[in-house]
Image (cartoon, rainbow, N blue to C red):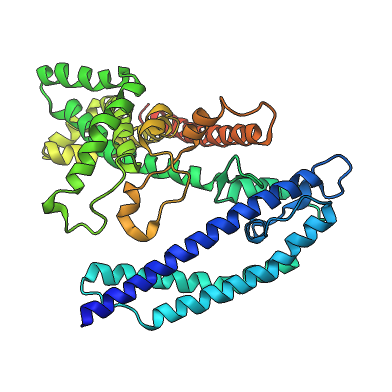
Amino acid sequence: MRAGADQAALEKFDEFANKFGEQLNGLLSDATDQAQALRETMLQPGSHAGASVIETESQDEASTTAAATPAGNEAEQMATLRSATDKFAQIADSMKAQINELLATPPALTSAKERKAFAKWKAEVEAYLKQLPAVVEKLRAWDPNKPVPAYRAITSFLFGTQWITASFWQDWYGIIPLFVGSLMVSVVALVIAVPLGICGAIYVSEVASPIEKSLIKPYIEFISAIPSVVLGFFGIAVLGETIRAFSRASFMQWVPFFPISERLNVFTAGCLLALMAVPTIFTLAEDALRNVPRGFKEASYALGGNRLQTIVRVLVPAALSGIVSAVLLGLGRVIGETMVVLLCAGNRIAIPDFTQGLGAVFQPVHTMTGIIAQEMGEVVRGSIHYRALFMVGLVLFAITLAINYVAQKLVMRYRTSIG
């Protein structure tokens, strides 16, 4: 009996979801036609509203809740758009009542994972419902004739969380999701490449025999000669599939965010970028260790220090500035890479869900370099989209320049300290 009641409760949720989806799709279709007609009217020569029709994010809410109307003059269409505020409030109240009715008789889920997912969904829905009154007030307070300040173009770009192009109403160019994607991929790459590169440099410089040096060093440096498109193809065909298959193995079911559904994600791109960064970090770190004065090592051995103590307490601290500069130059190498992230990062323009913890690393992202390579060849020269991509390039250039400047400063300090 209890199982039948739970099944009936779940069917109510499914019925609500399907009904809401149908209503929302129909409303969006009608709003698209009406919004396009209104936009064309306001962009005609002599229109007093012009490009200031849209100011805040609430305009998207208004455009998606407005009903389609026959093409008319600007005043009539604006009045129709204004009247959508009350309709939006009615829809919000109706949706809130239906959801509260569903939550009054929740199903008794037996699985702990299902209960956790349902509790998370419930919390997100309650948070969404709480913000609806504020959205209604923003719609009522919207003034389409209010001029948009010039600084809004800069702040919306630098702090915007949406990158939406080819929209039926208005495009949005916010760099935050692209910056977060580039940062996450770079961090994953450095977490893998820094230990491998530095430990390899220490081994080749202080531990390996001449025969081992003649084998290890050329092969590591040869990695930098592999074309990035080849590594990207390897990531798509081999690495991504391997990681996804590994996450679906029975012995990995204890990991909360396994199995993963996307084979192209932050981790896949980060692993390949780490492979590309290892030669840079290895070569510079090995040079820094080799340039430490020989007297430092001999003094350590003379005082009774063994090889491990000499490396950890004498050589690495003496070469620390050079090692840090190697890491920074490796960061500049991975953050400026294009082809690998374009092929293997997933190209989803969205901020990952950090509530999943480490699971965010296995979600698709887009990067600053990837968006330029993907969209620059298709945009109209001189358009807002073109200028937004140009600004992304400037931000990327500024970041890379800052990284290289800090690295050069550390190199100069390193050379001064041992010179």
Identify the residue shown where x is 68% and y is 36%: 384
Position of residue 376 in the picture relative to residue 224 (left or right): right
Position of residue 104 in the picture relative to residue 213 (left or right): right
Quarter of the image containing the C terminus?
top left
Position of residue 404 in the picture relative to residue 306 (left or right): right
Identify the residue shown where x is 72% and y is 54%: 55
Q: Considering only vertical position in the picture, is 413 above or below 39?
A: above
Q: Quadrant of residue 311?
A: top left
Position of residue 306 in the picture relative to residue 284 (left or right): left
Identify the residue shown where x is 46% and y is 80%: 100
Q: Measured from the top left, where is residue 236 in percent x and y?
A: 30, 31
The furthest residue to the right: 46
Q: Considering only vertical position in the picture, is 87 above or below 105?
A: above
The answer to whether residue 315 is visible is no
Q: Quadrant of residue 229?
A: top left
Q: Front-most of 16 and 296?
A: 16
Q: Measured from the top left, where is residue 79 in percent x and y?
A: 79, 61
Q: Measured from the top left, where is residue 76 in percent x and y?
A: 82, 57
Q: Considering only vertical position in the picture, is 96 above or below 406?
A: below
Quarter of the image containing the N terminus?
bottom left
Identify the residue shown where x is 15% and y is 18%: 215
The answer to whether residue 318 is visible is yes
